[in-house]
Structures are given as structure tokens and as C-alpha cells.
């Protein structure tokens, strides 16, 4: 029996320890203490794919209700926060992709968002959902009054530069405390993926929107949706 089995290590724990040791031995090679890395022949375990956590439509409605309680002396901040949250919910953008959006990336006439150099250094086009359009139109009007020469689409209130991750996380912390649901940008991305599948969006179209390298990653949203369907099926009487 291996030490991994004796100690009851999970694949993730084993992979972490292997990485620590490999890094140490790489350091030892670099300074001439040893010639080869003894960890190299040890295969890194493949981690099991977990179904992504997501928000239900009811949870999203609670989140939006919490957003309506946001108060600020600055009308730009109110409009921006709503636009940020709605963009996460209805586009599935990653946090880094959202904060790097430029004014010209958001085409409200064509109803598209251009994501430049997303994960994997790939450009892609994300369609703007019709429910997101009014929010972005209203926000852009306020944005151009707040900072007419702005290069970025979402700005910090004080700096008038690109909004930073800390500002978004502080917003999410406030909303989480109000609605009782712990939220993160990637959780909203997962929720978008699941709701899109439940709305019968093609798995291949969803892959392109989310910017996944492989459709197998996108299939996780289909799996989570099937679990929800099975649960609803077994909770309701058929006769």
C-alpha cells in the first residue's frame, strides 16, 4: 500500500505535495546539490472534475433585490454597480475580462462584447443578451457624463481609471451580507452557464461564449442541469 493510501490523501492533496517537492528539488538542481529531480517519474494524479456551484434563478432575484438597496451619493457608482452585476449574470465574463473591457469593446448597436486576449490569449465575441441591453445603454450615458474621455468601460469612482478587483469584491461582500448568499464573479459565470443550458442554448454555442478551450468543460453545465432536472422529476407526482 502506498503512503498516499495509508495517509488517506485526496488526489488534490497528493498533487499539492508533489508540486512542493518538485519545486524544492528544482531549486536543489539549480544550485548544484543534485543532478536530477526524483519527483519527475511520479505521475501527477488527474483531479476529478467537480460539478460547478451555481445560483438558482431565485437566488439571482435575491441578489438583484439586494442590489436595489445599494446607496451612494454618486449616481455613476449606482449605475456602474448595476451594470457590473448584470454583465456578470447575463454574459458569463470572467473577472479579468470584465475589468479590462474598453469603451469600444462594447458595441450596443451590434449587441456584442469583444473580449480581447481572454484566457488562453484568445479573442472572442460575446453576444449581449436582450435583457442586458437596457442596463448597458443607461450605464453608458452616465459613464460618458462622468468621464467623457474614458478609455475603459468600468471605472473607479475616485480614480476614474479602470475599476479594480478590490472594488468589485467589496461590492460582492456587501451584496452577500444583504441577501445571505456568498457570491463571487466565477459563481455568476457558472450560473450563467447553467441557466443558458436550461434555456436550450447549444452546448457548442455556450462553449464559444464562455471561451472554453474544450467542449468537455462546457459539458459540466449540462451535467449540473441534468441533476436539477432529475431532482424536479422525482419531486413531482406523475399520476
Image (tube, rainbow, N blue to C red):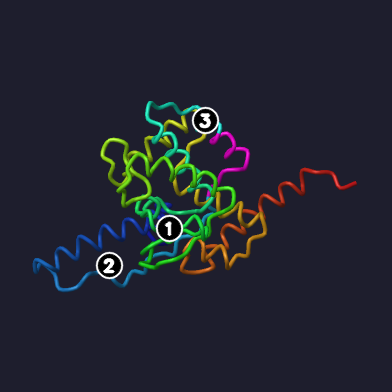
Q: Residue at x 59, y 53 (%)?
A: 194
What residue did someone put label 1 on?
A: 11
Q: Position of residue 106 (x, y in %)?
A: 44, 56
Q: What secondary structure is found at the residue carrying circle 1?
A: helix
Q: Residue furthest right?
A: 239
Q: Residue at x 49, y 69 (%)?
A: 214
Q: Position of residue 79 (x, y in %)?
A: 44, 37
Give left or right: position of 103 versus 137: left
What residue did someone put label 3 on?
A: 68
- Residue 104: image quadrant is bottom left
Mark 3 vs mark 2, foreground winner is 3
Residue 178 lies, with reference to residue 190, above or below; the image says above
Q: Position of residue 57 (x, y in %)?
A: 62, 42
The Cα–Cα distance between marks 1 and 2, rounded to whole angstroms, is 16 Å
The Cα–Cα distance between marks 3 and 2, rounded to whole angstroms, is 54 Å
Q: Position of residue 230 (x, y in %)?
A: 72, 52
What residue did someone put label 2 on?
A: 39
Q: Main secondary structure of the magenta part?
A: helix
The Cα–Cα distance between marks 1 and 3, rounded to whole angstroms, is 43 Å
Q: What secondary structure is found at the residue carrying circle 3?
A: loop
**Contact, mark 1 vs mark 2 (Cβ under 8 Å):** no
Mark 3 burial class by Cα count in 10 Å: few <14, some 14-19, many 20+: few
Q: Residue furthest left?
A: 32
Magenta includes 85? no
Mark 1 burial class by Cα count in 10 Å: few <14, some 14-19, many 20+: some
Magenta-highlighted residues: 53-64
Name the N-terminal-most of marks 3 and 2.
Answer: 2
Amino acid at each position: 500500500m502506498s503512503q498516499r493510501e495509508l495517509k488517506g490523501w485526496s488526489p488534490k492533496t497528493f498533487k499539492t505535495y508533489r508540486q512542493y517537492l518538485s519545486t524544492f528539488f528544482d531549486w536543489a538542481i539549480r544550485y548544484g546539490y543534485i543532478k536530477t529531480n526524483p519527483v519527475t517519474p511520479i505521475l501527477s494524479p488527474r483531479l476529478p472534475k467537480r460539478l460547478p456551484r451555481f445560483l438558482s434563478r431565485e437566488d439571482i432575484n435575491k441578489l438583484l433585490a439586494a442590489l436595489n438597496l445599494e446607496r451612494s451619493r454618486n449616481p455613476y457608482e449606482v449605475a456602474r454597480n448595476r451594470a457590473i452585476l448584470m454583465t456578470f449574470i447575463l454574459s458569463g465574463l470572467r473577472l479579468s475580462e470584465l475589468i479590462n473591457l474598453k469603451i469600444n469593446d462594447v458595441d450596443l448597436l451590434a449587441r456584442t462584447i469583444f473580449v480581447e486576449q481572454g484566457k488562453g490569449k484568445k479573442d472572442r465575441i460575446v453576444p449581449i443578451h436582450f435583457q442586458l441591453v437596457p442596463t448597458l445603454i443607461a450605464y453608458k450615458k452616465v459613464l460618458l457624463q462622468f468621464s467623457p474621455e474614458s478609455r475603459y468601460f468600468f471605472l473607479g469612482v475616485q480614480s476614474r481609471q479602470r475599476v479594480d478587483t478590490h472594488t468589485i469584491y467589496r461590492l460582492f461582500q456587501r451584496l452577500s451580507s444583504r441577501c445571505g448568499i456568498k457570491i463571487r464573479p466565477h459563481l455568476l459565470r457558472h450560473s450563467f452557464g447553467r441557466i443558458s443550458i436550461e434555456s436550450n442554448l447549444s452546448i457548442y454555442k455556450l462553449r464559444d461564449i464562455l471561451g472554453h478551450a474544450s467542449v468537455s468543460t462546457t459539458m459540466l453545465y449540462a451535467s449540473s442541469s441534468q441533476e436539477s432536472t432529475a431532482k424536479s422529476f422525482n419531486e413531482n407526482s406523475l399520476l
